[in-house]
Amino acid sequence: MVAVTLEKSALRSEKSALRPDRNGLRNDNALRGRSARFGPYQVSHIQHPAMRLESDGDNFGHPWRAVRMTFVLDGELKLQMGTHSEVVGPRCAALTVGWQPVKMETTGARVLEVDIAVERTQMNGFLKCDDLVVWPPETALPSATCAALRELLMQPGANDTVRNETTRVVDQLLTAVVTCRPEPEMTHECVIVDREHILEYVRAHHTNQELSPIRIANHFGISTRTLHRLFEGDTQTICGYLAEARINSALTQLRDRNMADATLEQIAELSGYGSALALRRAVLSATGKTPSEVRAETFVAVPVVPVADVAVADVPVADATRAA
């Protein structure tokens, strides 16, 4: 009888551990050490028992749009968003978004967890991606940030002045981590990419001001290291080809009579430069002349000589008399 009771009790505990509660991935079985709020950042030290949890995109139970930064101190977490899954161990960090379903499984782990009200922070523009992001253990910045956050969690601030300063520090630390995200690891580096195809893509999309080696590599499903290696034997890098495409486009438009009324700001936008100042610098570097000087050379007035005057000037008088 006692054995049956214990067995039923164990089954109830297991079901409880596997059942997501109303707070998404926040489970009552997680033994929280300390928790503190620093403005838009909720920082918590958590001991997870063995469990499997799943959130349904409810922003981890918060009433605001949330992302979660998880720093693993001990143990391992298996995280999954969509078809992307990662095992995150000690000295690793992971970023998950609360508006997408997230699965988490562990046999036990101690973590530092930061829930971020993303729309109240300056990092909002950097968190447009809905994919799982993981920082490997050799990445120094997340480990240093985790250590600093643990210290701040122990002493969150006794008054408003100290608390505000601490919030500023937390914001700087986490913004630095998020804006220095690791490049995604490509599992299929055997993808065959034609070098000329990449150049065609650059020439076709050079007007995009955000086009960069990272974006080009992501488009073709390769790492930036592989991208740069494809051009190692060339006289210029992929960045050089991108700059060449933009300056050629700019010079063509500056010399086009149909674009004579276009402003430098308009030409800068059509050529992939962020501003007229960037356009001026690029043109001056490439030609030694300003955009206005390039235009002046192209549109210089050509004197028109009357046809009759040319005939009289070129025909000798005697010949003209015989002709008459």
Image (tube, rainbow, N blue to C red):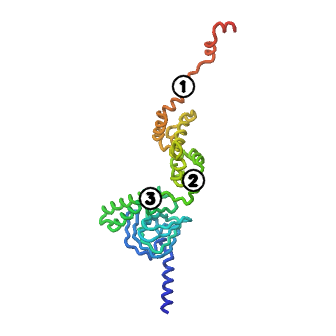
- Judging from the image, what secondary structure is the residue with disc 1 in? loop
**Quadrant into which the C terminus falls:** top right
**Marked residue nearer the N-terminal end (3 or 2):** 3
Dot 2: few (<14), some (14–19), or many (≥20) neighbours within 10 Å? some
Q: Is residue 147 above or below residue 307?
A: below
Name the residue rendered at 56%, 53% in the picture.
219
Q: Is residue 210 left or right of residue 310?
A: left
Q: Which mark is residue 220?
A: 2
Q: Nearer the viewer, mark 1 or mark 3?
A: 3
Which residue position holds label 3? 178
Separation of residues labelled 1 and 3 (CA atoms)? 56 Å
Q: Is residue 280 above or below residue 153?
A: above
- The amino acid type, in three-letter code, at marker 2 is Phe
- Judging from the image, what secondary structure is the residue with disc 2 in? helix
Separation of residues labelled 2 and 1 (CA atoms)? 48 Å
Q: Position of residue 236 (x, y in %)?
A: 51, 43
Dot 3: few (<14), some (14–19), or many (≥20) neighbours within 10 Å? some
Which residue position holds label 1? 301
- The amino acid type, in three-letter code, at marker 3 is Val
Name the residue rendered at 56%, 34% in the picture.
256
